[in-house]
Image (cartoon, rainbow, N blue to C red):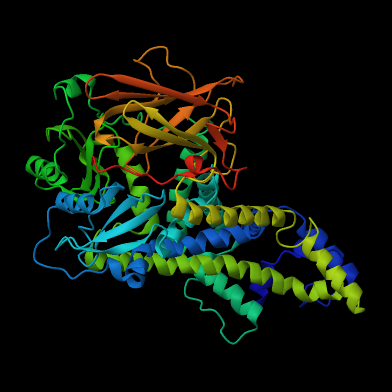
Amino acid sequence: MSAEIDSSFDPDALPEGALPDNQTTAPSATKARRKKKKKLTAHRAAYLVHSFIGLKLSLLFTIVLATGTIAVINEELDWLIYDEMRVTPQAERLNEGELMDRLDAAFPNAGISFLTTANQRPHMAAMAQVSSPEGGFQKVWIDPYTGEITGQTDFLTVGTFFSILHTRLYMPVIGRALVNVFGVLCLIGLISGLISYRRFWREFFTLPRWNAKPRIFLGDLHKFLGLWSLWFVLIMGVTGTWWFYHNPLVFYKVAPQVLPTRFIEPQLTHQDLDKLGSGIPNKLSSAEIIRSVKTHDPDFTIGVLRPPEHNGQAYRVMGTKGEILTSAMDSSYYVHPYTGEIIGDRLVEDITALQRFDYAMVPLHYGTWGNEGASDLAVKLVWFIFGLGMTVLSVSGMIIYYQRTRSATNKLLPEQPTKRFFKKSWFIFRPWGGPMSGFKYLNWAFITVTCIGISIAFTLQREGASGSGFRYAEQQVGEWTISLNATAGLLEKDLPPIRPGRQTNMNVFIHGGNPKAIKFMHVKARKPRTMRAPGAVVHGQLGNQHSNTIMPKTIKDNAKLWVTIEDWYGNFYQASWPLMPDGKQTIDLRLNNQPTTAEASTTIEIKETL
């Protein structure tokens, strides 16, 4: 067996002039042996590819694997940590919409973005994401059996923190695409590993030699875990590669879209809204919305409630009918928020086979296809164990490399302590040689950006989008007092917010007046020529209202930012601010630590007109 281990060793990985720790052959014999091994065979090529994948991005690879393992059990982990999430099952659950109505009553001055019902988790509280008046985000937990609010937690719970770290590494723009790259690497590493490991099918029941030297034991363990994880690595590779195809390839128009055209959600037309008559209409309660859905489809298990973000949007009720390899929110009904009429749907039972394949990626990747109860926990535990095995594979591969080269590297170091220290440091920081060579800088750079992103995420949790970017001071628009805050994006809030031709997040704050009296609000980076095209619509719940505004390709010195409000009586109101900072109406908050009181107020003070 020792000969077999040595046969997988690549002497070219050693520092120049060094010998492996178990080799005593004369230099001339070693050179002759190296010349023979330089012949590129399929076995050797696969070994080089496998080693390259496992070593060059080993730090990032390990982070992605470890956080993915934790993300599998993120709900269970949070359930153990936070008392607010635990409830005692009872005979009947309340109407899911009633839970939302109770939360609306408890938080009248904050916006509830969505409610997850936990219908498939009998011991777990329902959860709503709330935008706080201060601009941050929190999770509010409510007992689905009694309607009692059990408490609040930060948005970034322990489980959520690791889930986001796994899916996007807290990196703006490229985070998700970078993580998807590792799905492709998993698939390549699987294929190259099987080719480089000769007659691997004979070794499934060959246990690691526990009493051997650490290097031999780790080598055995690496092969043993790799063989028994083949099916799991294949799933991770296929799902990750599928997502890589869509982001970045399809996303950046490098590859064609293979899925059907993006689904356009049903909306309320102007005619629909005109039928409501003149004056501020009353929306149905969430309980009435849910009763309408259950009457229409009694077999529909409700997973998520998502209220409209503006008056032209339908109330979206997401759920499932128990289809295999789908999530609890892959089917949707769209409900008229004023009449309760079902105006559209998007059901798993109606989609194509390729779309079903796409939907299956998430439950396969995260092991959530057990759906509920003991089967759900059992599947997740299997995924967790094999995810842990993949993490050990990544770490053990790195350790094996270091142990194989440690003795040889030490022989190249001078005996004098100072020279030895600097020589050893040079081996660490030089841009060639070693397991990662120049890729070490890429690993460190990405990890640094990830740490910065994590810091921004915690700030965002406390403050939302306020406190950075450009602030447009309070101004009267009709009966409402409005201010705005421009940011490049949530995780990019400290970047220049106004860039020619780029999209900007315009966060809108209502300081005075009745928000319900606003039919539509629009933002545009130039004066609207007509009220038919007043700009990007402002959407989102109170505390998180914003528009995605495209900046002109050329920004003039006198450029203005315009807000247009239409009320329910057909009246239009407009106001404008200098688009770029002028130190008075428009303030660059990134440069001003102590703005004036009128400019600094970022708290949403919704009046009692609610």
Lateral position of residue 267 relative to residue 394, left or right? left
Q: Is residue 18 visible?
A: no
Toward which corner of the image does residue 483 lie, by quadrant? top left
What residue sits 18% from the left and 49% below the top? Answer: 101
Toward which corner of the image does residue 508 lie, by quadrant? top left
Toward which corner of the image does residue 336 lie, by quadrant? top left
Q: Can you give x and y, in whole percent of width and height, for residue 242 in the image?
A: 45, 44
600 shown above or below 529: below
112 shown above or below 28: above
Judge by depth and name the residue closer to the eye, 295 or 406: 295
Q: Is residue 523 visible?
A: yes
Q: Can you give x and y, in whole percent of width and height, for residue 458 in the image?
A: 49, 56
Q: Can you give x and y, in whole percent of width and height, for residue 188 in the image?
A: 56, 51
Quarter of the picture containing the C terminus is top left
What residue sits 89% from the left and 70% below the top? Answer: 27
Judge by depth and name the residue closer to the eye, 420 or 143: 143
Q: Residue pushed farthest bottom?
A: 211
Q: Residue pushed farthest left?
A: 295
